[in-house]
Image (cartoon, rainbow, N blue to C red):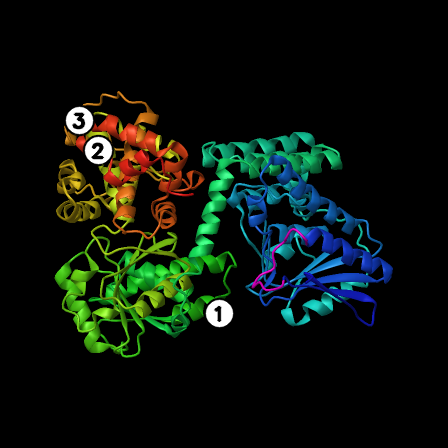
């Protein structure tokens, strides 16, 4: 069954429909290049005036290459062949006697956009579903089908680098303005415009649409050198040298303007082949496959029935939850707060986010207004009778949450789901007095809600399968990656985070400087250090969770008493302007040196950064092994995704369980045992020791 369906219209324009059989989306498969060459030969035989490529899928042009092909590339030579095969097929399109046109509606990403770049013309629909981009960097790769060579010639070096180094997706209007596509038109006339372009013949050489400064910089070796040097400096700063793909992208783009065509394309192909073989790319591809698999779980047709949501509490968490429910999930949202000011603050929270998007033309004024109109507020339960899901986001007080369950059961329909955003209280306790405990579930978001991709879904023993499925699918509609975790104190993310942060605090109390501890973990690969993270979350929030974890799980979760002194002095972190850092300077945070005196610390650095990182991370790994053994998480895969998306565990390491496999379980156990001679909280967990003794790994 061919990917391509070929037919001639009355103007001798070949209309080629791309439709991968049996799949929801078009992806580039092994057979794509050979079948494409056959279609091009058919066009030559028929002496066509032009050839238009359009997708047979509803909202997808070509979503990229099939990533599974890369896992089948066992050697560098296999990966090199994939890139060269793709490059050669696309080269054939340029030598045709007739023009080729990509008529794009929906996603044209990765190899899909590279295919479109190889066409003579590109026209796309102006629909919101149309997105173009080269996101290969997110898989630790570079575009290997000519993307690094063709894109700079169309949009300029600087824009091409920006798009490829970030993997950002480009909207239709942006694409037309930058010259990535020739026209952006209504979907209803997409084919009509594409056929007109086909009848125009081959295009003349085109130059990128650049402003005067960009023209000056990109038109000479000295200016280009400035561009590439700046790009390299930015990459080094942002990646810490952990990700090789961005540097390889810069090298390939540089080759596109400094080397002859064959050598430049060879640079791209060889860079692609090298990257496919790296552990970093394997880890990032593993994350991609894991999140794809997770989307297939807990599918429910009933999820579509969640059309109205309510949020209890208009604070930062409540405001964030209301925002993603309205803006992402597209449902009507009712915010209840005890005060009108709380409702006003929550509405303003959404307004600020949406207005920024409207100014950047991501949203139209009408779209912004429509979203704002879908969020309403109340200080009582008016309007709750038709709500499908209620999410509480109030402070950690069991009696308060239990009272809210009773209120919702009184005010809402029998089918209404009550979801608690608690970060530590067991859901079974919240549901203890419920008349309909099957509707009660945990739905734990991370702050800031609109940016953090993870949510933990926490059913208690009495939660129904239908409630779990509907909640999981609603979280996906909000743009989240949900993991279902067991109802036990701390759930998963906070449980592995607490000992990690505690160890950082213990190192501080032992005399290690604040900035050294945080730098050690940033250099390890975390986005922020543990003490800076505590400032962001709020030191008071951390202090409320710690006693619950200690009571339920034991003394290893006891937080240092030093935290109490910080709270007494109103040093709660960023929200009060002071914590471990001060936030008064507009230039950013800086270490608050007075913390050392307050906590009675004499700075006495004795460990190097690697030792600091190992001590903190080993605590996290140890606790993750216990969580898997106790069934808190269903699999090592869920544990890896939860840690990466919930607390920023370095993606290039693949997550805690992947990292333990790579290091070797034996080595992890040995390191923990060494630390345990000083402090028994490091004692390797029984499941970890059992794995080491059996010579097993978490992944086969």
Q: Give the range drawn in magenta.
A: 21-31
- Element carrying mark 2: loop
**x then y, percent, for residue 628:** 29, 47
Decide which of tag 1 and tag 2 comes sooner along the chain: 1
Question: What residue is shown with label 1?
Answer: 366
Quadrant of the drawing holding the C terminus: top left
Instruction: Say which element carries label 1.
Output: helix
**Distance from Cα at disc 1 to Cα at disc 2:** 59 Å
Q: How crowded is mark 3: few (under 14 residues within 10 Å), some or many (20 or more)?
A: some
Q: Is residue 212 visible?
A: no
Q: Which residue is drawn at 15% across and 63% down?
A: 400
Horizontal relation, residue 643 to residue 216: left or right: left
Q: Which residue is drawn at 29% across and 65% down?
A: 344
Residue 595 placed where, x, y %?
20, 32
Q: Where is residue 435 in the image (x, y as percent from the top left)?
A: 17, 73
Q: Determine the image quadrant of residue 38.
A: bottom right
Mark 2, residue position? 683
In contact (CB < 8 Å): disc 3 and disc 2: no
Tell me the CA gap for discs 1 and 3.
56 Å
Quarter occupied by the N terminus: bottom right
Q: Examine the rendered structure and indicate whether residue 318 appears above or below residue 242.
A: below
Disc 1 crowd rating (10 Å Cα; few below 14, some 14-19, many 20+) is: few
Distance of mark 3 from mark 2, alpha carbons?
27 Å
């Amino acid at each position: 069954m061919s990917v391509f369906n070929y037919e001639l219209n009355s103007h001798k324009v070949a209309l080629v429909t791309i439709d991968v059989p049996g799949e929801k989306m078009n992806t580039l498969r092994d057979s794509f290049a050979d079948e494409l060459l056959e279609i091009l030969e058919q066009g030559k035989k028929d002496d066509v005036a032009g050839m238009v490529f359009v997708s047979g899928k509803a909202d997808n042009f070509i979503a990229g290459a099939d990533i599974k092909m890369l896992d089948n590339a066992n050697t560098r030579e296999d990966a090199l062949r994939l890139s060269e095969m793709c490059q050669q097929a696309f080269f054939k399109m340029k030598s045709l006697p007739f023009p080729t046109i990509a008529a794009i509606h929906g996603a044209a990403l990765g190899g899909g956009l590279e295919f479109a770049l190889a066409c003579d013309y590109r026209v796309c629909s102006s629909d919101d579903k149309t997105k173009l981009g080269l996101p290969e960097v997110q898989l630790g790769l570079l575009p290997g089908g000519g993307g690094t060579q063709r894109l700079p010639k169309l949009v300029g070096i600087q824009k091409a680098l920006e798009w490829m180094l970030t993997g950002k997706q480009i909207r239709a209007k942006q694409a037309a303005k930058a010259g990535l596509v020739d026209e952006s038109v209504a979907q209803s006339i997409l084919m009509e415009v594409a056929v007109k372009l086909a009848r125009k013949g081959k295009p003349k050489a085109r130059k990128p649409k650049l402003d005067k400064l960009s023209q000056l910089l990109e038109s000479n070796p000295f200016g280009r050198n400035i561009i590439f040097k700046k790009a390299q400096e930015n990459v080094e700063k942002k990646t810490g040298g952990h990700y090789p793909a961005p540097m390889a992208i810069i090298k390939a783009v540089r080759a596109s303007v400094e080397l002859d065509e064959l050598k430049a394309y060879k640079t791209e192909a060889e860079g692609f082949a090298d990257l496919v073989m790296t552990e970093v790319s394997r880890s990032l591809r593993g994350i991609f496959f894991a999140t794809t698999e997770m989307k297939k779980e807990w599918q429910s047709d009933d999820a579509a029935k969640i059309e109205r949501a309510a949020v209890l509490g208009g604070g930062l968490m409540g405001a964030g939850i209301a925002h993603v429910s309205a803006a992402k999930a597209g449902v009507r949202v009712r915010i209840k707060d005890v005060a009108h000011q709380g409702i006003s603050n929550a509405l303003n929270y959404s307004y600020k986010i949406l207005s920024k998007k409207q100014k950047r033309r991501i949203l139209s004024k009408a779209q912004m207004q429509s979203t704002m109109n879908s969020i309403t507020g109340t200080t009582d339960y008016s309007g709750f009778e038709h709500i499908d899901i209620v999410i509480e986001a109030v402070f950690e007080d069991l009696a308060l949450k239990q009272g809210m369950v009773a209120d919702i059961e009184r005010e809402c329909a029998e089918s209404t789901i009550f979801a608690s955003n608690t970060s530590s209280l067991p859901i079974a306790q919240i549901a203890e007095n419920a008349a309909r405990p099957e509707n009660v579930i945990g739905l734990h978001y991370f702050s800031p809600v609109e940016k953090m991709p993870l949510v933990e879904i926490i059913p208690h023993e009495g939660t129904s399968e239908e409630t779990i499925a509907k909640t999981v699918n609603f979280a996906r509609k909000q743009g989240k990656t949900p993991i279902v975790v067991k109802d036990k104190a701390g759930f998963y993310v906070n449980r592995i985070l607490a000992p990690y942060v505690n160890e950082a605090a213990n190192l501080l109390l032992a005399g290690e400087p604040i900035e050294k501890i945080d730098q050690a973990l940033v250099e390890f690969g975390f986005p922020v250090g543990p003490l800076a993270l505590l400032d962001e979350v709020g030191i008071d929030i951390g202090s409320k969770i710690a006693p619950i974890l200690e009571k339920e799980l034991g003394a290893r979760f006891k937080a240092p008493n030093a935290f109490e002194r910080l709270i007494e002095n109103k040093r709660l972190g960023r929200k009060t302007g002071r914590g471990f850092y001060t936030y008064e300077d507009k230039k950013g945070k800086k270490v608050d040196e007075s913390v050392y005196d307050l906590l009675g610390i004499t700075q006495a650095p004795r460990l190097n950064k690697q030792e600091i990182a190992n001590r903190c991370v080993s605590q996290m790994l140890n606790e993750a092994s216990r969580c898997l053994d106790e069934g808190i998480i269903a699999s090592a895969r869920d544990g890896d995704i939860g840690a990466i998306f919930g607390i920023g565990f370095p993606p290039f390491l693949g997550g805690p369980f992947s990292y333990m496999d790579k290091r070797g379980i034996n080595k992890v156990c040995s390191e923990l045992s060494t630390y345990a001679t000083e402090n028994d909280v490091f004692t390797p967990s029984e499941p970890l020791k059992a794995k080491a003794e059996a010579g097993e790994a978490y992944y086969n």
